[in-house]
Amino acid sequence: MMLIQTLIAFAVCLGVLIIVHELGHYWVARWCGVKVLRFSVGMGKIVFSRRLGPDQTEWAISALPFGGYVKMLDAREQDVRSIPPQDLAREFTRQSVWKRIAIVAAGPLANFILAIAVFAGLYMHGIPEPAARLRAVPEKSAAHAAGLRGGDLIAAVNGEAIQGWTDLRWKILQLAVDHAPARLEVERRVDDRREPVHEQLVLSLSSLSASELEGEFLQKLGLDLARPQAVIGKVLPDGAAARAGLQEGDRVLEVDRKPMMDGLAFVELVRSSPGKTMEVVVERQGREVPLSLMPEAVLKSERVFGRIKAEVPLAPEMINVSQAPLAALGKAVQRTWDTSVLSLRMLGKMLIGEVSWKNITGPITIADYAGQTARIGMVSYLTFIAFISISLGVMNLLPIPVLDGGLLLYYALEVLTGRAIPERVGEIAQRAGVGILMMLMAVAVFNDILRLVS
């Protein structure tokens, strides 16, 4: 069932992005007066088609789902000697270079517009996400050296307000790519004050290497999401927790004379202690109660872990991040721009060897993420579609022949020189572009397989 959900989520995501991209080319071509012969979702052999509209454009679905195309009346691809004069005037190569630029650029632009629309809709609707409140900060970490402590709420980074954990992660990532320090505004509660105290701290990001940005880089800095205290929820009668005497509402104070930071620390300790006796002290109705707890050993996926059959709530403090329509649109544009720029920066760092080529993902990983985000909820799935749409737009603008960016490079040279590039040069560049794309696809599929194996 999970595989079917993943395939459906991937197919919907891919279909939407392809259709939006090709509709960008189609609409601008029609607006520029170019005759469109075929609009295809997919590549290769046509499996279904129907002709519609005054030009009898063929709307088709093709066998290979990875891609699509808009076929226009083009003298480079067909014999136009028998074409009526009124249609010949609508042939692609007879259009001005600026019209050709507009038609080619419209596909990637449509992907960026889709991302902006999705982000704006999500920001207006409201996105539930964890507050940017910190878990206890490890002593030997950049965050501790900066003066950050557990319970601190990050209110702003470099003067820009932070609305949630995702916002914090995004701002730190952008600064880390440039090795720039993060100036943090922190809200900290002090015992003898009713209102939180605001402090200005500087977090150095110089300790992060480019390769460390691939994973949970915030934890490498000592930043982690705050979790609730280790309070016991429902206790099953046939489990280790019930045998030890744990009761619903007990707050775990310490285990083996070590204080429990939060519920997550307790869960991790239980899971790593199968068959081991743990001396636990809990707070129950205002008094401390010592207990002996032995998690039962459970084998799952060739790994043994401890289980006590008791609930321990781990949900962090949640907030609803929302914006007014105009503010949401502005934030959506900024997020799309920032994501595009960051993608290009990361690509540049791959080329010079600062970032691993393992970051390149292929259809298997994208399908996996599509399924995961769809199972989490519609907000996560739509956010995923927006990010993939941006990636598709950026990729298509790369100056690689056979991509939209390669064609735009040709037309830019035509604007500068006043003449089109020689046909022979175009053919050689096309072959080179295909080779580059095949190499990138091979790397992406190889990385996908490695992820599956590991």
Image (spheres, rainbow, N blue to C red):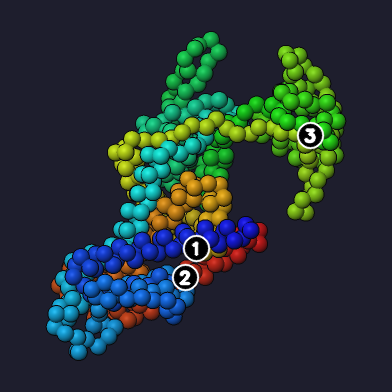
Badge 2 marks a residue whose secondary structure is: strand
Q: CA distance from mark 3 to mark 2?
A: 49 Å
Residue type beneath disc 2: Pro
Compared with residue 92, is residue 181 higher up or lower down, i.e. above or below?
Answer: above
Instruction: For the C terminus, give its image quadrant.
Output: bottom right
In terms of sequence position, does the residue under pointer 1 or pointer 2 come before the other?
1
Residue type beneath disc 1: Ala
Question: Residue 391: x percent and y percent?
Answer: 41, 57
* Mark linked to residue 11: 1
The answer to whether residue 324 is left or right of residue 359 is: left
In terms of sequence position, does the residue under pointer 3 or pointer 2 come before the other?
2
> Residue 151 versus residue 102: which sits nearer the camera?
102
* Mark linked to residue 236: 3
Compared with residue 136, is residue 381 higher up or lower down, i.e. above or below?
Answer: below
| Eye-nearest disc, 3 or 2 | 3
Compared with residue 226, is residue 125 higher up or lower down, i.e. above or below?
Answer: below
The reply to whether callout 1 and callout 3 are in contact (CB within 8 Å) is no
